[in-house]
Image (cartoon, rainbow, N blue to C red):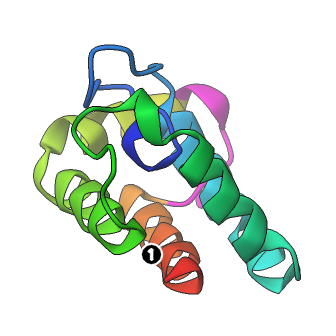
């Protein structure tokens, strides 16, 4: 969701990379480690700043507004939930080992809260 420094499967902007579901899954898995890392906040904010011009929809918006747009889209666009489910079903056969969409977005919210 490149509009926040990540890349969507369902493009938010014409030049988005279709990888949001993978990034959402990876961030959920890495959330406890990222949250504990002293440099996480600085590095994440810098990455988002460097990627500001990649999405006209959120270009120039303050970080708080970028986060609001991102979370609103993840909460309301059912295609993201469907894509995430398809993605995790392809990568894991372990029942319960992969976070659900709701668990993954909850972990993303934790990471976003660390940035704001």
Depth order, front residue of 109/101: 109
Residue under the image location 38 percent in, 26 percent down = 9
Q: Is residue 71 left or right of residue 100?
A: left
Name which quarter of the figure residue 96 lies in.
bottom right
Residue under the image location 88 percent in, 82 percent down = 38
Q: Residue furthest top?
A: 15
Q: Is residue 97 magenta?
A: yes
Name which quarter of the figure residue 31 lies in.
bottom right
Q: Main secondary structure of the magenta part?
A: loop
**Residue 25 can be seen, yes or no:** no
- The secondary structure type at the circle numbered 1 is helix
Return the x and y of residue 84 as percentages of the image width and height.
Answer: 40, 39
Please determine whether, in this image, residue 100 is positioned above or below residue 53.
Answer: below
Please determine whether, in this image, residue 38 is positioned above or below residue 90.
Answer: below
Return the x and y of residue 53 as percentages of the image width and height.
Answer: 43, 33
State how many labels appear. Answer: 1
Return the x and y of residue 65 as percentages of the image width and height.
Answer: 27, 67
Please determine whether, in this image, residue 51 is positioned above or below residue 98.
Answer: above
Q: Which residues are magenta?
A: 90-99
Return the x and y of residue 110 as percentages of the image width and height.
Answer: 53, 81
Q: Is residue 54 left or right of residue 37?
A: left
Depth order, front residue of 96/11: 11
Please determine whether, in this image, residue 26 is positioned above or below residue 63.
Answer: above
Which residue does the numbered mark 1 point to in the structure image? 109
Q: Is residue 12 magenta?
A: no
Q: Residue furthest front?
A: 60
Residue under the image location 28 percent in, 26 percent down = 10
Depth order, front residue of 58/72: 58
């Amino acid at each position: 969701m490149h509009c926040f420094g990540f890349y969507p499967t369902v493009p938010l902007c014409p030049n988005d990379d279709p990888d949001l579901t993978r990034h959402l899954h990876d961030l959920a898995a890495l959330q406890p480690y990222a949250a504990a890392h002293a440099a996480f906040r600085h590095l994440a904010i810098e990455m988002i700043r460097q990627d500001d011009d990649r999405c006209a929809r959120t270009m120039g918006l303050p970080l708080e507004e970028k986060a609001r747009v991102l979370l609103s889209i993840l909460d309301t666009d059912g295609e993201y939930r469907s894509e995430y489910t398809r993605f995790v079903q392809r990568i894991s056969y372990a029942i319960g080992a992969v976070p659900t969409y709701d668990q993954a977005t909850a972990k993303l919210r934790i990471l976003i809260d660390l940035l704001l």
